[in-house]
Image (cartoon, rainbow, N blue to C red):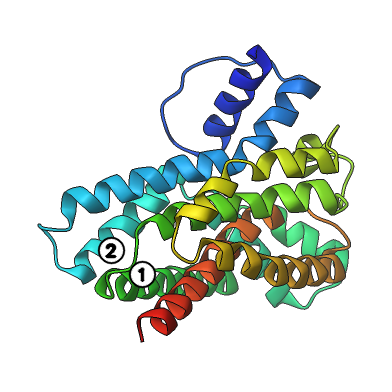
Amino acid sequence: MKDVAFGLVLALQFLTRLPLPFACPWTPATRRWAVRCYPLVGVLLGGLLVAAAALLENLLPAPLLALALLTLWVALSGGLHLDGLMDVADALGSNAPLERKWEIMKDPHVGSFGILALVFLLLWKAALLFVLLDAGASLLLLVMILGLGRFSAVALLVLAPAARPEGMAASWKRDLSPRDLWLAALPLLPLAALAPGGVWLCLALAPFLMLYAWGMLRAFKGINGDIVGTAIEGGELWLLLVAWSWWSFVTG
């Protein structure tokens, strides 16, 4: 049980800005449990967003509530995955040879493609949050979306090859197996049954993951931390779009 607890703390420390000043051992067992806990961390973050929405829904109109929730969403993760998104966008937009793409991703400066990707992603997220709130959609959808977004990262880490033997993705990938993917999915199963449209969100994630993995492997021949973080951001945006489409169809 110690390894489970340490793994959860490691996942929270890595994926969020929640203050957890604990030193955890970095061992194969704690690494595996940390990755298994990624979706659970997403569920926790989604729960915090739902709690904030419940507190603010009678105080703010829907557009401002959507903006407030998106601000909290970004703040809770510290913009970690957005940084990866910008790096990947700059590398892809460069149309450079493979090695030059890797150099661009390592460059701390942000280029025009990265800024455009960030702006459009946040605009789309804000707009989709607004239409979901305005339509009275179940806020449990947010919990599912954040959990599944981080499940995307687990799927890539388990199933896709690392581009380099060193780096963040390679260190997290070490010692993982398909069993870890199934264990990571466990917290999402009851939510999929409880959340309206939860099963459809789970099903909709599969084509996104397949297309994303194919595109990244074709462009970079493997994954790194930036590509994994971009999968979280892209997965969340895709699932927001699916949730809005499903809710609109069901409610007519």
Tell me if residue 224 can be seen: no
Is residue 210 toward the left or the right of residue 48 in the image?
A: right
* As drawn, 216 above or below 59: below
Q: What is the count of numbered marks?
A: 2
x, y percentage for residue 158?
81, 46
Residue named by callout 1: 126
Residue drawn at (45%, 71%) of the image = 119
Q: Residues within 10 Å of mark 2 (few under 14, many from 20)?
A: some
Q: Quadrant of residue 214?
A: bottom right
Residue drawn at (47%, 71%) of the image = 243
Residue named by callout 2: 67
Disc 2 residue type?
A: Leu
Callout 1: helix, strand or loop?
A: helix
Front one among 216 and 42: 42
Q: Quadrant of residue 134?
A: bottom left
Disc 1 residue type?
A: Ala
